Image (cartoon, rainbow, N blue to C red):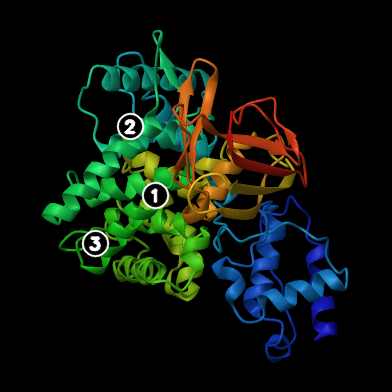
Amino acid sequence: MDLNLRRLFSILAQIKPEAQAAAISLDAEKSFDSVSWLFAAWATISKRLHIDTPYDSQAPLWNFPGIKPTYDIAIQKNWIPEYDLTMKTMFPNVVPETQQSLVSALLNEMEHSIGASTTPNPSVLIASNLAGSLDINAQSLLVQQLKQDAVERVTNELSFTSGQVALYVLGFRSSCEDPSRISSVGKSVNLLQVLESKVKQELANIKENHTPLTTYYQVALDVLALCIEGSAGAYPAGEALAQAAKDSQLGLPFSVDTGAMAAMALTCLSDAKAFSEDTKSARLLKDSLALILKRILEQQQSDGTIGNIYSTGLAAQALSAAWQFYPSELWSCTKTLSKVLSEIPKGKFSIPTAASQVLPFLKGKTYLDVGSSCAPENVPSITVDYTIVNDLLGESFKFSIQVSVPEGSVLLDVMKKAQQMNSKEFSFKTEDTSQGLFVSSIHGLVGSTNERTYWQFFSGMKPLMEGVATYRPTNKEHILAIYSKY
């Protein structure tokens, strides 16, 4: 085994970072049984993509036989650097150089739809950011248009469905704009708060009438946006979505579009600690995700189309994002890629919304990449220990978690990541005040002006003099939130 592993990593070390692809030929398949071919694929693609997300022993990938032990041996023997790695996709679909112009032309055509006289489309903004904008001025105009539209809709109580709000949240996040602080014409709105409120209304209607106020496609968008934002509201909504999938309510006949969005939403939730636990809710989420993917795969056609040509983009994103939840041989990514490319010259994606759904796939991205689309490349991660403590009111508790965030992140990012990983223990709420963002509750325990209680933050035993939205933790720092009196 040592010899086989050493050979594998010796080969991997010779792959140049700029390589578009790598083919590895080994003498005998049997000799690598103990290494795990899945691990070989993971290691190869990890090197190819320069993935910098921390490896998580709770993530589904690491539960495959042979993966974790092989990784540990490789590190122990010092055969590869100790990367912080995880697999985002098994399908790094690379458009051939001879066809890159097709993708650029489609992106250019979509961005040319942006203008002062056109209705702003958040889906176009998401695709523009994920695909790498060719027209920064048009993109900037679109952001300003969407800000103005969002503020007007919220402040004037105009029609704004949950799914529409979710798309705006995703669009702003993809542009590195904080959805909880959207300002225009002297007014500000908290779109994340608006979305959380609308999702509660969706869930109430599902409970009472067994159907959402809008559609399950919109509910799936809601779950995805809340999950990417690290909102605790993603989990009850995700359970409702999973139950609907189990009950075959995602369209009769099955809607590929709805299924694809639901698959991406549930895949986003799969990164949370709650998903990996053996609970009724976790089993429901995993079983429903597997069922949705099975039904999407059943919609494949011999030419690579999934459902119809217009649903193929979202379906391909979903299958790329959720690669670890189904056998890879069940989908030919290459065939789907070739089919999509062949339809571009025919004008099949000339409508901006249609283009916005295939462009991320053509660039090897999915909607799950929205949260990281604006992060600078090669920014190292830091590890922060985060502890919440209450010995003051009611039942005492103390919970600790270790999170990894990009260097330069603020404390609020640490809290969001902790909530995303374990919403049961690390949920929190904030309020906008004249002094800045204020943490009003953690773990359901609310500060009270009458009782003179609040959540005080410390670095070690030293009180923080900055708020959660501005304080930037350092590597291996221990942050404590202690329920206190003043």
Instruction: Give the residue at mark 1.
Output: 234
Question: Does the rendering let one see residue 459?
Answer: yes
Who's the residue at 54% across and 43% down the image? Answer: 416
Disc with the residue nearer the chain's start (2 vs 1): 2
Question: Does the rendering let one see residue 105?
Answer: no
Q: Are marks 2 and 1 in contact (CB under 8 Å)?
A: no
Circle 1 Cα neighbour tier, 10 Å, few/some/many (<14 / 14–19 / ≥20): many
Q: Residue furthest left?
A: 209
Does residue 246 appear left or right of residue 269 in this picture? left
Does residue 360 appear left or right of residue 306 in this picture? right
Q: Between marks 3 and 2, how big is the CA–CA gap?
A: 24 Å
Identify the amino acid type marked 3: Ala
Identify the amino acid type marked 2: Val
Q: Position of residue 398 (x, y in %)?
A: 60, 54
Q: Between marks 2 and 1, how big is the CA–CA gap?
A: 14 Å
Instruction: Give the residue at mark 2.
Output: 194
Instruction: Give the residue at mark 3.
Output: 244
